[in-house]
Amino acid sequence: MPDLLIELFSEEIPARMQGKAADDLKKLVTNGLVDAGLTYASAGVFSTPRRLVLAIEGLLAESPEVREERRGPKVGAPEKALEGFLRGAGVAREDLVEREEKKGAFYFATIVKSGRPAADIIAEVLEGAIRNFPWPKSMRWGTGSLKWVRPLHSIIALLSDETGSTVVPVDIDGITSGNSTQGHRFMAPGAFSVTGFDDYAAKLKAANVILEPSERQDIIWQDATNQAFAQGLEVVEDQGLLVEVAGLVEWPVVLMGDIAEDFMELPPEVLQTSMKEHQKFFSVRDPKSGKIVKFITVANRETKDNGATILAGNQKVLFARLSDAKFFWENDLRVANAGMEPWLDSLSNVTFHNKLGSQKERIDRIAALARELAPVVGADADLAEQAARVAKADLSSEMVYEFPELQGLMGRYYATAAGLPADVAEAAEAHYSPLGPSDDVPTSPVSVAVALADKLDLLTGFWAIDEKPTGSKDPFALRRAALGVIRLVLENGVRMELSSVVKKADFSHAENQDGVSGPTAGEYLPSLLSFFHDRLKVFLKDQGIRHDVIDACLAMAGNDDLVLLVNRATALSALLKTDDGENLLQGFKRANNMLSQAEEKDGVEYSYGADVKFAEDGAEKALFAALDTAEAKITPAMQVEDFAAAMGEMAALRAPIDAFAKNVQVNSDNEIIRRNRLNLLSRIRTICLSVADLTKIEG
């Protein structure tokens, strides 16, 4: 069985596109081959800045013969109908057979599609893949119609087996497939021919091209960390930058350079961000001082001077870049030292949303809400309001304008420089958190108050103007904000009623999508609470709590107190994972179903209370006693929100309920006894439903 090698050799492919492009090439080609009947054993893809490579092993030499039986018209049908069938099937009249079926005799034709050589199929599939390749951006060049991310120079399409190799003929706008490629642009620019993938990979490495991206990443990281370690330093880990840099070079050569002393006073994050964004440099840190003292750059070639010229050029460019950063930093410090008022004033000219006002108006709302929330989270109200008013001041700074990803972080530096309290400075950075499911959650009370106010203002604002997430569209990251509120509340044990907090938000000026005044908080509150509950279900699912368990707890009072809700759901989930809990659930459902049917039949609700004096059976009397005991313990446990204890007492009802169901006939001939037993079932239902709505539990 032959192997297939495909290489598409071009000018440099942007690093951010290489990984997806390699996957797209594999998908387009392999799917096309399989659809045409050519199966294979395995396929692998590789990418460098100048080439996409697909290697397929164990490919069929030709597609298998396909036989299809097609039913035609009835025997005796008009001649024209028969002729049309013969043309469509591509067979002669003598090739037809008659077969009797339930609806009569029909003509049948067997259509045979002969197998095709692999080379013919590959040529068609590869041309289609190249012409329809899904580049995010592409270009045309010369006089051809082909569009590619950068000019395509050559194509390898090679079938090989133990007897030799054969070029699959492909011609696209004058680019003809062959068996040759080129090595490194500078170190080995000559062309060479190959006979298969193993020969191709070996010759590429000899020509200073490392084909596998992960191998280039390993070389870069190992050399960088070794050079840093030799000087008692450490490289700041950045996996995204590592992947990107590995996509910029075919033969990585790691060089470590110095940062001028002029820039040592810049915050480490500024140095790191500037070098990463502008130069694609790794930062090298002194673990003792925490300062960024050197940088790592990755060249694409070896030089006679061991990279000295390259390093000198990079250091010269870096000096200019960091001079800009230093200029921004010094200008910003002057404003911060003056109290940041110019920044705060300028935010009144920055529109947050055309229906929600300016950033300054939003800050005013956040500050008011943070003051309201401060007592709830244990923060000082004055500090919480002060922190909210300066938390977004850095949005007007020159540094954040240049590097938006530093917002919040620079706010902390500037608040510190302005002499503001440490809690206020911390909140300037922490109020954006958490940004994702794995991000750290603020724990300082002032930071928690501002972070909650920020996210709740965002959510209530967009609900007020009726711009909610739809499907996969969430342009304002409202799902992330809701998850942030959930994590802030749960991980800090914040006891608050979301409905009360939402009602305190003032959006009376907001307009909805139709340009009319938006709804009041009371009008959009049910929808917003439902949104929070949906996000909570997703969050708790990852912790092993089922949706139906959460629904059972949502049906209870206080479902806008997330801590109360989750504590109840956690206890119920733990109960249902035990045998007692599962059997209790089944006993409850039997009792509830029997009671519901009797109430529907009799037209009354059995909730008057059962009397033990009418109990006849020992199991019946035992259930009375068990319910008395359970209720005496469950009621105080629920009052102090000890859900685990309440669930445990409820689980103890399993045995007496089972015994009652087994030994006692509810529908007694004696109507008084029957009604008393139905009222006893009602008591079971009432006690169980006081803990959670077990009717919502599946199973």
Image: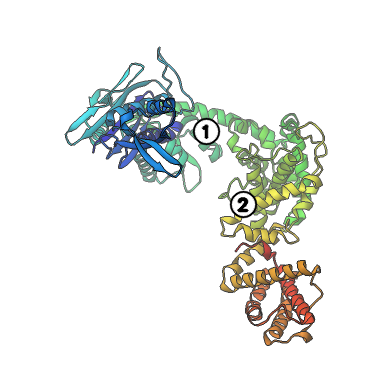
Q: From the top left corner, tell me how far across and down residue 154 is, in percent.
A: 32, 22
Question: Which residue is most to the top?
Answer: 143
Whether residue 245 is visible to the viewer of this picture, yes or no, is: no
Q: Residue at x 76, y 66 (%)?
A: 600
Quadrant of the image for the N terminus? top left
Q: Label 2 crowding class (10 Å Cα cut-off): few <14, some 14-19, many 20+? A: many
- The amino acid pointed to by label 2 is Val
Q: Is 562 placed left or right of 170 in the picture? A: right
Local packing at callout 1 (Cα closer than 10 Å; few below 14, some 14-19, many 20+) is some
Q: Is residue 119 left or right of residue 412?
A: left
What amino acid is at disc 1?
Answer: Ser
Numbered mark located on residue 441 in the image: 2
Pointer 1 residue:
274
At horizontal 44% and vertical 17% (from top left) the residue drawn is: 140
Q: Quadrant of the C terminus?
A: bottom right
Residue 340, percent from left and from top = 71, 36
